[in-house]
Image (cartoon, helix red, strand yellow):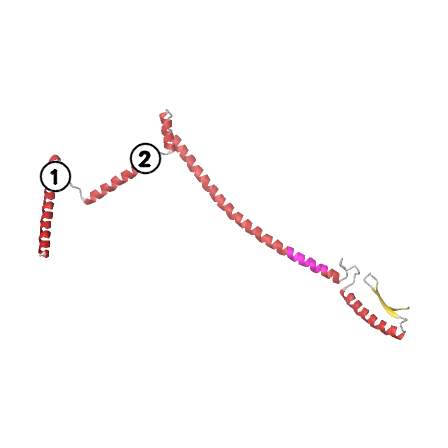
């Protein structure tokens, strides 16, 4: 029973919707007939003939869009300070520049742009040269530091060589390395011989080793009590 009632209700709704659609269509048709009667077209056939192809409509829409964009650009330019200033000067009675003056100004602008481009090129060249010079200075500083380190090492080795050769400031006795080694050996021999001499002389004699302070040494000699 419920299913039958639902089906009847759906049928009633469908009939109502169809009736409403028919009413809307009739209203739209009557409105279109009134508008057609008020227009310059004789009938609907004349109206269809006046309709433009879709390609032409697309072209016209694009032209209208471009016209609107052009108008927006012109409105923007009109609000710029330069344009407003020119309008104010024109309103004050100042004469607009003639074609020759405009050409001179354009030439001056072109010349200024050329000079600006040349200045930019010169600046780029200068920056490249500056980087190159900076790199050369860094390399030179590294080389100078290496030379300074080598000179310091050579000075240290030279001072050591002077000392070993008996000519250094820290070698007041002017003894060479060979002389120093021989003197040390001679001193050891003198000490051993002195012990034997004291034993043989019952302590009355001994051998003494003495540096002269001039790079030469005296040999061991006997010394009495």
- Image side of residue 201 versus residue 121, left or right: right
Which quadrant of the view contains residue 44?
top left
How far is disc 1 from disc 2 in space, using C-alphas? 41 Å
Of 28 and 217, the residue lying toward us: 28
Task: Look at the numbered disc 2 and give the secondary structure of its residue.
Answer: helix
> Quadrant where the N terminus lies?
bottom left
Q: Magenta stretch: residue 39 in it? A: no
Which residue is pictured at 70% across the width and 60% down the height? 157
Res. 191 visible in picture = yes
- Image side of residue 165 versus residue 46, left or right: right
Residue occupied by mark 2: 75
Residue occupied by mark 1: 31
User: Which percent across, then down, holds residue 173?
Assistant: 80, 61
Q: Is 124 situated above or below 154?
A: above
Q: Is 19 situated above or below 159?
A: above
Which residue is pictured at 64% across the width and 57% down the height? 149
């Amino acid at each position: 029973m419920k299913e039958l009632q639902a089906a009847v209700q759906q049928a009633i709704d469908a009939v109502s919707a169809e009736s409403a659609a028919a009413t809307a269509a009739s209203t739209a048709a009557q409105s279109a007939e009134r508008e057609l009667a008020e227009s310059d077209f004789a009938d609907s056939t004349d109206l269809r003939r006046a309709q433009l192809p879709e390609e032409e409509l697309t072209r016209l829409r694009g032209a209208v869009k471009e016209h609107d964009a052009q108008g927006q650009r012109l409105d923007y330019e009109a609000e710029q300070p330069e344009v407003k200033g020119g309008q104010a000067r024109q309103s004050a009675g100042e004469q607009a520049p003639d074609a020759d003056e405009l050409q001179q100004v354009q030439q001056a602008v072109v010349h200024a742009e050329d000079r600006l481009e040349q200045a930019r090129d010169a600046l780029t060249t200068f920056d490249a040269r500056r980087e190159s010079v900076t790199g050369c200075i860094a390399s030179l500083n590294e080389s100078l530091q290496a030379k300074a380190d080598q000179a310091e090492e050579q000075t240290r080795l030279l001072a050591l060589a002077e000392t070993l050769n008996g000519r250094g400031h820290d070698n007041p006795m002017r003894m060479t390395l060979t002389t120093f080694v021989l003197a040390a050996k001679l001193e050891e021999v003198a000490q051993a011989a002195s012990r034997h001499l004291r034993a043989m002389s019952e302590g009355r004699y001994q051998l003494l080793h003495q540096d002269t302070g001039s790079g030469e040494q005296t040999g061991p000699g006997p010394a009495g009590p």
